[in-house]
Image: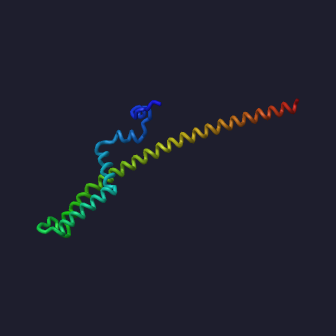
Amino acid sequence: METVKNTEINAVEPETWHVRHKKTSTFGQRLADSVATGMGSWRFIIIQTAIVAFWMLLNVVAFFKHWDPYPFILLNLLFSTQAAYAAPIIMMAQNRQGERDRIQAYNDYSTNLEAKLEIESLQKQLSDIEEQKLDKIIAMLQEMKKG
């Protein structure tokens, strides 16, 4: 069998709503999604925890210079700055996720509506076929009764 390249497969597949949505995203929207994804991960939490522990350890046991002595005012300032920028970026990403969810829900609704109409059409066709069969059986029984 001949193997098919990915580019050939992608050319045949229809473009989904998700692909169209990603194509229309601006740089800022993609950046917001990336930042929210990164900050919402265990990797980020673990790395940040390690940095904070290292920062505090260096400032507690520093032999000659404490650049941020207890209660770590500079560290608190850094956290506040990080939160001030992270919160609106994460909110932008959540708004975009809500938009994606609405688009997906609408597409699911459209698909379900089309399926419902198709099922109703098939039921009607089956009813018509059943009715035709019954008419033929009745006609055959009437012929048998006459004959």
Quadrant assignment for the C terminus: top right
- Residue 53 is situated, as x and y percent measured from the top left of the image, at 24, 64
- Residue 100 is situated, as x and y percent measured from the top left of the image, at 40, 46
- Residue 50 is situated, as x and y percent measured from the top left of the image, at 26, 61
- Residue at 43% in and 44% down: 103
Pick out the residue farthest to the left: 64
Pick out the residue farthest to the right: 147
Given residues 9 and 118, the one toward you in this image is 9
* Image vertical order of residue 12 relative to residue 93, above or below: above
Given residues 30 and 95, the one toward you in this image is 30
Q: Is residue 19 left or right of residue 81?
A: right
- Residue at 21% in and 62% down: 77
- Residue at 50% in and 41% down: 110
Q: Is residue 71 left or right of residue 28?
A: left
- Residue 118 is situated, as x and y percent measured from the top left of the image, at 58, 38
Q: Quadrant of residue 52?
A: bottom left
How many circles with numbers are drawn on the protein? 0
* Image vertical order of residue 84 relative to residue 2, above or below: below
Q: Quadrant of residue 70?
A: bottom left
* Image vertical order of residue 44 relative to residue 114, above or below: below
Colour convention: rainbow
Q: Quadrant of residue 136?
A: top right
